[in-house]
Amino acid sequence: MGFQSRECRLLLLAVVAAFPAVSALAQENSAAVLTPQEIIQRVRAHNRDREQRLESYSVRRRYHLWNEVTNKRSELEVEMTFRPPGEIEFRQLRQSGSAFLARRVFGGMMEAEKQAFAEENRPRAALSEDNYTFAPAGEEVLNGRRAYILEAKPKRKDTYLIEGKVWIDAEDFAVVKIAGRPAKKPSIWTRRVDLVRAYRKVGPFWFADRLETISEVLIFGQTRVGIESGDYQVRLRRLTSAASPH
């Protein structure tokens, strides 16, 4: 399962780095038609505001994996704590199924997430015009909220970047969903990787809710990996804590 382990690490690194686990609160509601450049500028401005206001957050996560060839499964529950700008801690709570897969795949994914938030990697993987060409792709209502849809085309082949679509909340200018694939295949053994990541609002911020990936790897066949998040405990520097009723 070595190739799958490396592939999962690089995949999560790309998703987390390009689309942070928290997206920022907007300070104004705009019903105007905006260009992709204006939308991205607002997202980045509010992300900077988030970095100033967020003190820390913690959440319980459930990682799960299934491989069709081996029919092996694995599940891991952890408590994850994040402190800006990039300090991440994981505490294992429960593990079932293959301990080998939990150690190699889930352990690799958690390590990749730490790398994604490292200061030297954030500019390379940011949702910015330095890294992407954006084009309008319409609008959609997600969970009762209007969202802009942008086509995101990476300017280089890089495992840190995602090629696909980005949904951005039209009121908060937060990333609420992404769907696509890595701009560069994690390995020559990987035929295809598809991913969907969704976010939900907790207090003034948006946090990662769930990640689903399906990868096609030579020899190992199809592997499904998912991450689901439970209740968030959020600490703001000047505001009271907020928790989500998940």
Image (cartoon, grey):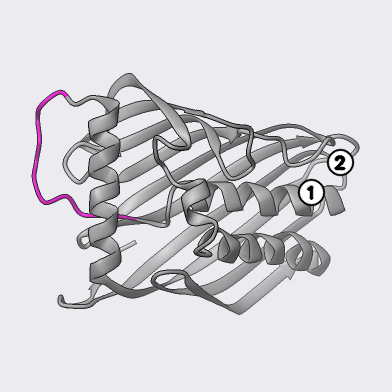
The answer, for residue 190, to whether it is visible in the render is yes
- Cβ atoms under marks 1 and 2 closer than 8 Å: yes
Residue in the foreground of this view, choosing between 38 and 221: 38
Residue plotted at (17% across, 50% down): 26
For the question of whether residue 202 can be seen, the reply is no
Judge whether residue 26 is colored magenta.
Answer: yes
Q: Toward the viewer: 176 or 114? A: 114
- Residue drawn at x 40%, y 69% is 85
Checking the image for residue 125, the label placed there is none
| Location of mark 2 (residue) | 220
Give the residue at x 34% y 44%.
Answer: 175
**Residue 207 location (% of width, % of height):** 36, 57
Secondary structure, mark 2, is loop
Q: Where is residue 236 in the image (x, y as percent from the top left)?
A: 23, 74
234 vs 29: above or below:
below
Q: Which of marks 1 and 2 is in front?
A: 1
Residue type for callout 1: Gln
Question: What is the secondary structure assignment of the residue under circle 1?
Answer: helix
The stretch in magenta equals 23-33
